[in-house]
Amino acid sequence: MLAPFACRPSESRGRLSPEEESAFRSCFQRDRDRIIHCSAFRRLMHKTQVFVVHEGDSFRTRLTHTIEVGQVARTMANALGLNVELAEAVALAHDLGHTPFGHTGEDALAALMAPYGGFDHNAQAIRIVTRLERHYADFDGLNLTWETLEGIAKHNGPVPRPLPYALAEYDARHDLELHTHASAEAQVAAIADDVAYNNHDLHDGLRAGLFTEEELAGLPILEDCFAEVDAAYPALDPKRRRHEALRRFFGVLVTDVIEGARATLAEARPGSAAEVRALGRPVIGFSPALFAALREIRTFLFHRMYRAPSVVKMRADVTKIVQDLFPLYLGDPALLPAKWREDVAAAPDETALARIVADYIAGMTDRFAIGEHARLIGPNGLTPSAQGGPGGSAR
């Protein structure tokens, strides 16, 4: 049973290119399925979350992170009476626009694209699902519903002007009402992202040896989680102890969001998804007390993980790869694969060409970018044994 404020497939604003409805799947289910089957989703398997993919097979990649976000979004949406398929679709698409090398790659590409309108991974996700995926006979992109596109574009809240070019380009054709908050389902996808990375970055930091369980046990929330495990399982194997404590931490975050959202929605009493958008404030989020605790945990992670010497060194190495590749392709577009050259030929100016180059680099996987840099420029010390790139290969 859906809550009154949930998004209903029967009330969807539809797709930019009208299509006949499926006999077996709702419009939001079809959106989710198209996202899972698109090329950009598969490439997330070889894109960085925090650690570059060749640093270890057990660390999260952008794909495993996305799957975890989808799982959390389903749980929360179901508990709140929201449309689970829409929440999952937004969750699965939220990182499609990420560059190789995670936020480091995005920062490098954004700086290079500053003279050409900038770069933002959320806006790039919209560009991917509305333009760059070219598989269907009747349209470019995935032709997703308005509700899914809205969620991808503004799951983090209203988008301030000036809009990123990749978002402005589509919004001019299909108004996504970027000045408002998104549906509750999209807000669930956004907070699920926070829950997932706050939890799994602790796992990965421990696995990498950047800090210890004892250090985590001194942090808020985690202190109680480790104490609970120690009381229930004295002398537990360290790896199991770690897992049990972080499992409890994960549960605390999810429970806090669900209970807080129930209280907020009961107080606001929105009667429809449109009323959720019109409230002028989010309805899904962490409680103030938990948010304060997470801020302390994030500060710890910033200093001990994101700015650890080994991570900083890798950030510098991969930043140089992006900085080297962008001007190379911009100066000699013939280096781009043949299937990109039709777009290059149609580019009216350098700005349009730069955006094509940014699309190509943003679509690269870590290992493909490393391999292309080694092939075109020279050894970089990071060259992997196997490569895969935009569309699956270099050419």
Image (cartoon, rainbow, N blue to C red):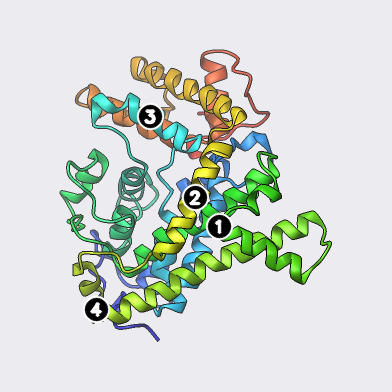
Kind of residue at badge 1: Pro
Q: Is residue 107 above or below residue 186?
A: above
Q: Which residue is mark 4?
A: 272
Exactly how many numbered labels are in the figure? 4
Identity of the residue drawn at 56% across and 13% down: 378
Label 1 neighbour load within 10 Å: few <14, some 14-19, many 20+: some
Q: Decide: marks 1, 2 in contact (CB < 8 A)?
A: yes
388 and 206: which is toward the camera: 206
Earlier residue among tags 4 and 3: 3
Q: Secondary structure at mark 3?
A: helix
Which residue is tagged 1? 220
Q: Which residue is mark 2?
A: 296
Using the numbered discs, state the Cα–Cα distance from disc 1 to disc 3 in whole angstroms: 36 Å
Q: Nearer the viewer, mark 2 or mark 4?
A: 2
The CA span between labels 4 and 3 is 40 Å
Give the percent coordinates (x, y) of residue 120. 33, 39
Report the amino acid beneath label 2.
Glu
Rendered position, 83 above or below 90: below
Which mark is first along the chain, 2 or 1?
A: 1
Residue identifier under label 3 = 109
